[in-house]
Image (cartoon, rainbow, N blue to C red):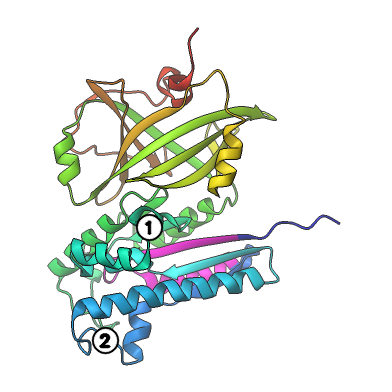
Amino acid sequence: METRPKQIHTIVITGGPCAGKTTAMSWLQNALTDSGYAVMFIPETCTDLNNSGVTARASKTNFDFQRVQVRYQLLREDIYHQAALASASDEVVVVCDRGSMDDKPYMTEEEFALILKELGQNEVAFRDKYDAVFHMVTAAKGAEAFYTTDNNTARVETLEEAIELDEKTLAAWAGHPHLRIIDNSTDFNGKLVRLLREVMRSLGKPEPFEHARRFLIRYPDRSWLENNPSCRRVEIIQTYLTDVQGEKRRICMRGNDGSYIYYQTSHCTGTDGSRIETEKRLSLDDYQRLMMEADPACRPIRKTRYCLVDDTHAFEVDLYPNWQDQAMLQIELDDPKAEVKIPDQFEVIREVTDDPDYQNYALAKIHM
């Protein structure tokens, strides 16, 4: 009898102060368990340390505390992964109450770089090791009447401080390929429903629908992008493979400064026109093996991507080496009819969501 390969999904629930994470964890526990997953929760590292007497105030410096916190976070993630491997369940979801990038806002860029060096890590792999990240926006931004410090003795931030910390936390995660922002555009119950829907979609339940809107824009100000604290640059090489049983496949390497991670993406079209997309992480060996299946009718696509986040959305700006006066702006939505406010820094030429000539596959085709 063929055994089903074990699937371990590692996701992060993060956000600003008073965003509703504690209640969300209970919702996720029930919903994921009811859907047949074994669920493991990694409690918030900072809270765990503080409750044990390990605090920033008791440390010689804040940096000493952050160093301990990052190492403890990684240690627990490794232990929980081992526990997931040992689980009798075929599908395990490891939910991290905050992840390793949540420490970055509490350090200078130099301190964070030093910790990465000590760990032998690079920021791309450090950030993108999680399958998906869900940022719950603080109630201080859009639901001010519900912002409180009464339900958490460790929360001391004012409204303004909470907003600033929320923005810094979101900026730390900018660039992750599956970052979703859960804002306060509905009441709190609606916020939880949207979070649960996005989590289930990331797991492929019922199907990982994606609605992407694409806009052709004038070539952007790269210096503005490079200096924006909420923006991250990623270099991408995307290679299309030959189709298998009607599924389009591509592999991708993404990263920068010589450090890369690898994915395989397969997709087909659902009955409602939505794109049904599945993705899995690859090792370098798997990536190189699949390169042998590259579609000879397509050239690899090279692009520089700028991942930009604002209050409600994560935008992707793709710069192609052979485009000198234009670029592509993309945003993925759970509702294709949702209103999108494009940042003022981008001049839209026209929307090309439904224009087949501007799909990546068309751009990769070699015209003989």
| 21 with respect to 294 (left or right) | left
Q: Which residues are magenta?
A: 8-32
Q: Using the rendered view, name the quadrant where residue 43 is placed.
A: bottom left
Mark 1 is on which residue type?
Answer: Arg
Residue 315 pos. (x, y %) = 31, 41
Mark 2 residue crowding within 10 angstroms, few (<14) / some (14–19) / many (20+):
some
Q: Using the rendered view, name the quadrant where residue 13 is placed.
A: bottom left
- Look at mark 1 in the image and give the residue it sits on: 127
Instruction: Name the residue: 32% across, 46% down.
Output: 257
- Look at mark 2 in the image and give the residue it sits on: 55
Q: Using the rendered view, name the quadrant where residue 127 is placed.
A: bottom left
- Earlier-in-chain disc, 2 versus 1: 2
Mark 2, secondary structure of its residue: loop
Instruction: Name the residue: 24% across, 20% down.
Output: 324
Instruction: Name the residue: 15% across, 46% down.
Output: 227
Mark 1 residue crowding within 10 angstroms, few (<14) / some (14–19) / many (20+):
many
Closest to the observer, 84 or 115: 115
Instruction: Name the residue: 58% across, 37% down.
Output: 266
Mark 2 is on which residue type?
Answer: Thr
Above/below status of 344 relative to 192:
above
Closest to the observer, 305 or 186: 305
